[in-house]
């Protein structure tokens, strides 16, 4: 919002918003390919280099560590659309409630992170989660406030807001839906299909369907 105001008032040049959009798309796609489809659902395999790269990009998005995400998302799938679902919201503001915390998850969901603890990087990035965004903020602030605002703070803000909107809109009284297809660049909008087939790494069903995360996965999977 601040970035848009600065552009509209002529304080900064409009291409800075393109930087924000580009970084947002990058973080959204790598989060989907990494935290969601690889770390949580194990939908494909990749090299150690790409695994650590995806842990890092997910960390820099400030959404959650790979361990936290895996626990919460496994919890969501097991109890989807019940009172035990951490994504079962009565209002938009419920998105930010405390039930997301890992210690609130049932033991069966917390066991989901055991697989990741055997893999390189996950425990380290979880333990020092905020150190990486903080370091990047300092580096970008040294380069310039516009780079920091439009190249990191604004994209992360959009990531967090879009994730909240997705969690709120992607389920209704009939369960998972596909209403959010047009809202998200990562290809995660076919949420009903995902719940029916959680181990799919490619959510395209027709040749004309768009799934940028699947395009990335095609390049890095083995």
Image (cartoon, rainbow, N blue to C red):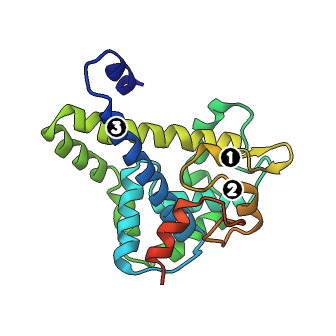
- In this rendering, is residue 148 above or below 65? above
Residue 70 lies left or right of residue 196; in this view the side is: left
Q: Secondary structure at mark 1?
A: loop
Whether pointer 3 and pointer 2 mark residues with C-beta atoms closer than 8 Å, the reply is no
Q: Secondary structure at mark 2?
A: helix
- What's the CA distance linking mark 3 and mark 1? 25 Å
- What's the CA distance linking mark 2 and mark 1? 6 Å
Outermost residue, front side: 208
Q: Earlier in the sequence, mark 3 or mark 2?
A: 2
Residue at 64% over, 45% down: 182
Q: Residues within 10 Å of mark 3 (few under 14, many from 20)?
A: some
- In this rendering, is residue 67 above or below 91? below
Mark toward the viewer: 3 or 2: 3
Q: Position of residue 167 (x, y in %)?
A: 64, 44
Q: Position of residue 128 (x, y in %)?
A: 32, 57
Residue 158 lies left or right of residue 101; in this view the side is: left
Q: Which residue is mark 3?
A: 153
Outermost residue, right side: 174
Residue at 45% over, 60% down: 30
Q: Position of residue 129 (x, y in %)?
A: 35, 54
Q: Earlier in the sequence, mark 2 or mark 1?
A: 2
Q: Identify the disc placed on residue 87.
A: 1
The quarter of the picture where residue 99 lies is: top right
Whether pointer 2 and pointer 1 mark residues with C-beta atoms closer than 8 Å, the reply is yes
Residue 11 lies left or right of residue 211; in this view the side is: left
- What's the CA distance linking mark 3 and mark 2? 28 Å
Which quarter shows the N terminus? top left
Q: Secondary structure at mark 3?
A: helix
Q: Earlier in the sequence, mark 3 or mark 1?
A: 1
Residue 194 appears in the picture as rendered: yes
Q: Identify the disc placed on residue 76.
A: 2
């Amino acid at each position: 919002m601040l970035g848009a105001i600065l552009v509209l008032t002529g304080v900064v040049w409009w291409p800075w918003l393109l930087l924000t959009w580009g970084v947002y798309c990058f973080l959204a796609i790598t989060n989907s390919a990494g935290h969601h489809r690889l770390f949580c659902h194990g939908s494909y395999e990749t090299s150690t280099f790409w695994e650590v790269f995806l842990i890092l990009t997910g960390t820099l998005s400030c959404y959650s560590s790979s361990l936290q995400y895996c626990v919460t998302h496994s919890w969501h799938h097991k109890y989807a659309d019940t009172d035990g679902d951490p994504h079962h919201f009565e209002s938009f503001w419920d998105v930010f409630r405390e039930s997301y915390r890992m210690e609130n998850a049932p033991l069966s969901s917390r066991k989901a992170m055991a697989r990741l603890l055997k893999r390189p990087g996950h425990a380290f990035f979880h333990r020092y989660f905020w150190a990486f965004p903080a370091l990047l903020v300092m580096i970008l602030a040294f380069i310039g406030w516009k780079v920091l605002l439009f190249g990191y703070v604004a994209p992360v803000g959009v990531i967090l807001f879009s994730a909240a909107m997705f969690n709120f809109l992607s389920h209704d009284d009939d369960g998972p839906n596909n209403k959010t297809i047009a809202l998200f660049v990562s290809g995660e909008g076919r949420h009903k299909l995902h719940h029916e087939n959680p181990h799919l790494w490619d959510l395209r069903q027709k040749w004309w369907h768009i799934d940028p995360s699947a395009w990335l996965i095609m390049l890095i999977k083995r």
